[in-house]
Image (cartoon, rainbow, N blue to C red):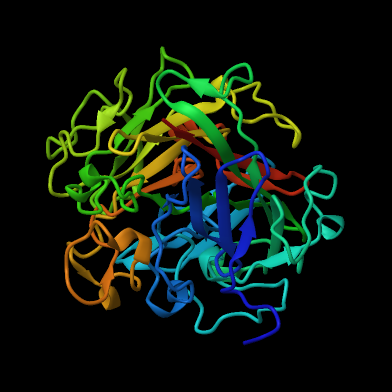
Amino acid sequence: MPAYDPFKPIHLQHPHARLRASVIPFGLTIQSLTLDSADGGEQQTDLIVAPQNPKDHLDAGRNFFGPVIGRFANRLPAGNLKLDLADGQRLNVDVPEFSAGGVSLHGGPAPASLSSPDSIEQKGPFDRAIWQHVADADSQLFFNSGYTSQPGAESPASSAIFAIESPHGDNGYPGRLRVEVLVAVLPASAATEGETRSPLLGTSEGSFLIRYRAKILDDVAATPLNLTQHWGFNLSSSSTKPEARSEQGRIDKHIVQLYPVDPAKGVKRLGLDAKMIADGTVIDLSKPDDEGQRHDWDAPDGKVIDHGRLSSGYDHFYVWGPAGGLASSDAADLCHERARRMRVTSDTTGISLTFHSNQAGTQIYCTEGQPPAPAPADKSGGEMKYVHRRNVEGEGKLGNGQRSAIMIEFGAPHCGFLHSSLEQWGGGASLLKKGEVYDNWVTCQAWQK
C-alpha cells in the first residue's frame, strides 16, 4: 500500500455529540455514522449501509454505497450535448455511455486504472477518485471557514477537508475543476431556536455536515456541475431490539417525510422517460406513477416506505425548488427550520434523521437494483457489515440486498441544464461559470428517543 492509504478510514467525532463518522479517501465515501446508545450503554447503531471491508468499494464493483458523485449526478443522455450560453458561446459536453444504452449515469464510466493516490489530479468520475486530505491552511475554498483539517493527526478531529482537481475534458466535461469537500461532526443542536429536544423526534445527538465547493481553474466559460452524496441509511438493521428482527434488515417500515420550501408550490416528482432520464416535466406527489405506485412523501406524517410501493420500487427525484435567504456562512448553524427538507424515522428503534440543505431536491433510491435477500456478497458490492448481519437470515457471506438501505442524494434536478423548464426548480441551469464558486451543503441530524 502507498503511504497514503485511500481505504483507511478517517474518524471524526465531537465532544458534544453522540454521533461519530468515518470516511475513506477513495470516492470520499461515508463508511459509517455511528450513534451511541441514549442510555449510555455500550450498544452503538451504525446508520450507514456499506461493505464491511472498505476496499470492496473498489474490488466488488461500482455499487455506490456512500461516495461523492460527480461531475454530474444521476442520469444524462449519453452523447454530444451542445449548449448555447447567454454570451453567445457554445458549450460542448460529450458524455460517454454508462449503465444503459443512451444513458450516462453518475459521471460516466470508470477509468481503466486509478489515478495516483498522492496526486491532486484525479481522472474519471468522482466516486473513483482518491481524494486528498488537505490541511485547512492549504485549502483554496475553505481556508477561512473556521473548520480545522489536520492530515495525519493521531486523535480523531471533528472536521476534515478533502480536495481533487479534475482535468479539462475528463469524461467529456469541459474545464479544469478544483473541488473541495468539508465534512464535519457538529454538536447537538435542534432545528428551531437551539432546543435539543423534540416531542416527535426525541433528543438531538449531533449532526454530520457535508459541504461541496468548486471553481473553474482554466479559461472555460462554464461547465455542468451537480454533486451529491450517494449515501444509504438503515436505522434498524444493527439494532438488538427484538422487534428489529422481523424487519430482516430492510427499510420497508421506515417513515419518510419531505418538507416543501413553499407550501403553495409543494414538492414535485421529476417526470422521466423510458430510460429514466428527466423529460423536463414535474408531477404532483398526490398522483401515483404510471404503475400506480404512491409518492406522497409530503403527507403530514410522512409515508411508510412499503405503503403503496410496487415491485419496481423507488428510484425517483423529488424537487422543492431553491430556498432564498438561507444562512450561507461557514459558522452559521445550518440545522434550522427553514432549511429542513426531509425526515427518516424508525419507530422500531426510536431513531430519526432530519436533513437540512440548500439543495433543490433529492433522489430517493431504495436499492431495488441490488439482488434480493439473502444477497450473495460477490454479487452485491461485498460482504455486508457484521453489525448489520444480526437481523438478516441466510448462510455464508451475505451482501446488502434489495431495500437494505434508503439512498438519499441531495442535488439539483438531473438534466437541469438541458431543460429550461427545470431552471425555476433548480435555481438555475446547473452550470458553474468561470469566476463563480459552487457551494452546496447538506446536514444529517440524528435524534433518539
Q: Is residue 64 left or right of residue 19?
A: left
In the image, 25 versus 93, the foreground residue is: 25
Residue 321 seen anywhere in this rendered image of the structure? no
Residue at 73% x, 71% y is 120
Nearer to us in this view, 300 or 388: 388
Residue 370 x/y as whole percent? 25, 62
**Residue 284 in the image: above or below residue 144:** above
Picture layout, residue 64 above or below residue 90: below
List x then y, in percent, for residue 441: 61, 41
At horizontal 47% and vertical 51% (from top left) the residue drawn is 42
Where does the N terminus fall, quadrant-wise? bottom right
In the figure, 303 relative to 364: above or below? above
Picture coordinates of residue 442, whole percent (x, y) = 56, 40
In the image, residue 268 lies at what x, y percent?
35, 28
Question: Residue at point 16% right, 39% down?
Answer: 309
Q: Which residue in the rendered view is the most extreme toward the bottom? A: 1
